[in-house]
Image (cartoon, rainbow, N blue to C red):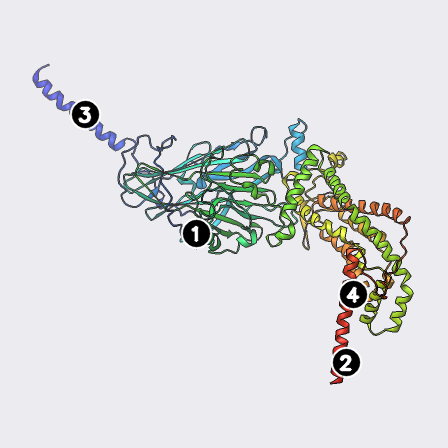
């Protein structure tokens, strides 16, 4: 080839190459700038009117390496300073994230946790071995044993799910899904970025999400990661971090949703949803952190939490003054809880405080009527993140039943004293009369009887009745004997009492005074009867047992007497000792009647009223003729309360409680019959009081008799003093 040809060819090749490059730039794939959240619709936020968390002086930023997750961009650009306004990358992927756990095999997983990109949170938590109703439990047990078709998933208990929240914007009312424990917002260098929108989260694996913050130059400023893992029981672990990808220091404020209010139990007798706190004593009282985590004397009933308004749930003026430090926070209902706690090891090692993750807890009531619920928000302390370092916001989550065997024996619940979430207490206003200590003791006794003696909860309750009645038998026997003696004395004194009524027809106080003197003369007093004492001694047990059987998860949906009634066409009678007995079956939907949430037609409360009537007729002494009209009226009211009002009040109570009271009353009648046979062989004739040499009646030897005599003596002196004062005034 000649030189002249080469000279012509080389420029032609260069020209073709340049044209190719230009065509590639013009017609090739566009190198688009990542879409940002700047133009997206604003996401819903919890924005209670409360003080923003202040920076904790003890909070440190961990200088850890970047977690090994799938990066959002293939090539990591060198760190650059923050330039201009911040925004979040948006993703168009609408695939449903894969769940953790399973519902088909309880041996593999206790629950199934479904996720949502909305806030990178939990869409729903449903248990695989806990059921909504007894019928659902029976159906699933049959299916898992190889009989019948698979029952509906709705028969499995749904602990919590995503809520829809409405909010106002410039474009009008918008709605957004608020996930359980989802991310709400992050503020970086004073700029607020919403995290509730599903488009800002990229799914990087099962339970793994990440969001990227960019500046106006499309430089990555920060990465937010949330990774959920599930243990073999009811525990979740939320590994969440904020990584500074820039060369500038970032001031970060983090906000996420906390445990929401849970659902009300279907067979509820009352609404006992609560918000609970675990806290550590101040350094002044416990400098070495030797005391266990406390949880008593500080809780919110649902109604109280709904009224807090702009005030935070934590800290309060009281907790700040006492220097209390937050350890865990839980939302509970009758049987279940969702709680967040510090990131400590399975051995219980690590900090017991949430101070670096949660500084302020606020609440907001949303929805109306039956759709009303309470959202809680967890505000982290304001923290500065140095370049190439990470803020760790990791926490543990418990989402399961309030079961003592789990919380008493498994870590980290033991180290955090999360057993305190189990509260056998009907109301915070009635904490004293609920006898928490007695309920705990009865729980141990019943559990021991069920697991090691009779192996059935119904029989354990019956055996507990026999134990209590045996312990009270000496008092009951003495009471029965004294009641019979008192009745015979009053029958003998009836003619004299009638004379007193004729002598003082218009002076009932005088009749009563003379009657008391007459009774003392014959050596008898009402204090010796002790008629209601055995019942009063059992009342604390009834109250404590009421609270125990209402809240004790172990007895939930447990049948009585080995499920013998369920052998007759799956009869629902006594199929669940924590609910009403449902003698005539259970309603598909609860029916509200006055103050009761009726779930079926019940038999045990009616039988209890009949037994009370027989008991009063059989055990009450025949003393009506010796009583004043006021006393007879009071006794009649008491009988009506026992026979009618008491069973009505307990109509929707747990059948385990009505079974206890019914059994106790029946055993009491049999016991009274036995005692009466013994009494019939005794000499119960009235004996006159002892008289000394001076003609004065001596005091009885028994304590009740001495108390009666002292009371009569004090009354006589009082009457004598009044008479002397009147005579003195007449002389003047």
Which badge, 1 or 4, is on the more N-terminal residue?
A: 1
Q: CA distance from mark 1 to mark 4?
A: 69 Å
| Residue drawn at point x = 85 percent, y = 57 percent | 486
Q: Which residue is mark 4?
A: 712
Mark seen at residue 47: 1
- In the rendered view, would you say 519 is above or below 677? below
Which numbered disc, 4 or 3, marks the residue that appears first in the sequence? 3
In this view, the mark in front (1 or 3)? 1
Percent across and percent down for residue 71 are 36, 31
Q: Which is nearer the N-term, disc 2 or disc 4?
A: 4
Secondary element at image label 4: helix
**Residue, x 75% and y 75% (percent of image)?**
722
Q: Quadrant of the N terminus?
A: top left
N-terminal of the pair, mark 3 or mark 2, is 3
Quadrant hosting residue 204: top left
How far apart in space, not on screen, are marks 2 and 1 (Cα)? 78 Å
Q: List the single residue furthest toward the left.
A: 3
What residue is pinned by disc 2?
A: 727
Observer-nearest of 289 and 379: 289
The residue that disc 3 covers is 16
Name above or below for residue 331 compared with residue 321: above
Distance from Cα at disc 2 to Cα at disc 4: 23 Å
């Amino acid at each position: 080839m000649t030189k002249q040809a080469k000279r012509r060819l080389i420029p032609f090749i260069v020209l073709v190459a340049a044209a190719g490059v230009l065509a590639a730039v013009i017609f090739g794939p566009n190198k688009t700038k990542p879409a940002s959240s700047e133009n997206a619709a604003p996401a819903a936020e919890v924005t209670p009117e409360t003080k923003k968390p202040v920076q904790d002086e003890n909070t440190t930023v961990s200088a850890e390496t970047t977690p090994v997750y799938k990066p959002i961009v293939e090539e990591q650009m060198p760190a650059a300073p923050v330039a201009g306004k911040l925004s979040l990358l948006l993703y168009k992927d609408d695939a449903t994230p894969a769940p953790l756990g399973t519902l088909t095999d309880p041996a593999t997983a206790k629950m199934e946790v479904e996720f949502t990109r909305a806030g990178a949170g939990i869409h729903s938590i449903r248990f695989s071995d806990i059921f909504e109703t007894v019928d659902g439990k029976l159906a699933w047990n049959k299916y898992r044993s190889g009989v019948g078709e698979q029952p509906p998933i709705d028969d499995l208990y749904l602990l919590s799910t995503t809520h829809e929240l409405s909010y106002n914007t410039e474009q009008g009312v918008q709605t957004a899904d608020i996930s359980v424990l989802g991310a709400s917002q992050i503020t970086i260098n004073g700029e607020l970025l919403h995290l509730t929108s599903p488009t800002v989260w990229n799914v990087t694996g099962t339970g793994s999400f990440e969001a990227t913050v960019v500046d106006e130059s499309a430089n990555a400023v920060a990465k937010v990661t949330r990774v959920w893992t599930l243990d073999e029981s009811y525990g979740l672990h939320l590994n969440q971090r904020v990584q500074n990808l820039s060369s500038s220091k970032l001031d970060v404020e983090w906000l996420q949703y906390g445990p929401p209010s849970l659902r009300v139990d279907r067979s509820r007798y009352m609404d006992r949803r609560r918000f609970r706190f675990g806290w550590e004593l101040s350094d002044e009282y416990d400098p070495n952190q030797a005391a266990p985590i406390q949880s008593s004397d500080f809780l919110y009933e649902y109604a109280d939490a709904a009224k807090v308004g702009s005030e935070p749930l934590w800290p309060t003026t009281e907790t700040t003054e006492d220097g209390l430090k937050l350890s865990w926070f839980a939302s509970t209902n009758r049987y279940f809880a969702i709680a967040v706690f510090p990131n400590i090891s399975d051995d219980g090692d690590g900090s017991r405080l949430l101070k670096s993750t949660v500084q302020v807890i606020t609440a907001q009531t949303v929805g109306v009527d039956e759709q009303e619920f309470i959202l809680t928000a967890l505000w982290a302390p304001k923290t500065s993140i140095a370049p190439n370092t990470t803020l760790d916001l990791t926490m543990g989550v418990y989402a399961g039943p309030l079961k003592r065997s789990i919380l008493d024996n498994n870590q980290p619940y033991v180290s955090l004293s999360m057993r305190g979430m189990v509260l056998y207490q009907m109301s915070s206003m009635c904490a004293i009369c609920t006898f928490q200590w007695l309920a705990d003791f009865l729980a141990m006794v019943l559990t021991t009887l069920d697991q090691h003696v009779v192996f059935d909860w119904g029989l354990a309750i019956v055996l507990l009745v026999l134990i209590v009645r045996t312990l009270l038998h000496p008092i009951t026997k003495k009471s029965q004997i004294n009641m019979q003696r008192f009745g015979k004395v009053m029958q003998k004194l009836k003619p004299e009492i009638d004379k007193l009524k004729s002598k003082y027809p218009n002076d009932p106080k005088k009749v009563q005074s003379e009657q008391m003197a007459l009774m003392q003369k014959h050596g008898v007093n009402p204090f010796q009867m002790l008629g209601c004492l055995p019942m009063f001694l059992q009342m604390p047990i009834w109250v404590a047992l009421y609270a125990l059987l209402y809240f004790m998860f172990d007895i939930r949906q447990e049948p009585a007497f080995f499920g013998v009634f369920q052998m007759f066409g799956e009869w629902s009678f006594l199929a669940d000792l924590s609910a009403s007995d449902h003698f005539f079956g259970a309603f598909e939907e609860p029916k509200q009647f006055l103050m009761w949430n009726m779930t079926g037609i019940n038999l045990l409360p009616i039988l209890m009223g009949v037994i009370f009537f027989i008991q009063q007729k059989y055990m009450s002494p025949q003393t009506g003729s010796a009583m004043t009209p006021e006393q007879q009226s009071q006794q009649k009211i008491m009988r009506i309360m026992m026979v009618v009002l008491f069973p009505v009040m307990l109509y929707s109570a747990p059948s385990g409680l009505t079974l206890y009271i019914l059994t106790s009353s029946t055993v009491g009648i049999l016991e009274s019959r036995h005692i009466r046979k013994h009494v019939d062989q005794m000499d119960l004739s009235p004996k006159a009081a002892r008289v000394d040499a001076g003609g004065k009646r001596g005091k009885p030897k028994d304590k009740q008799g001495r108390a009666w005599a002292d009371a009569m003596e004090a009354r006589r002196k009082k009457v004598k003093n009044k008479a002397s004062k009147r005579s003195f005034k007449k002389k003047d």
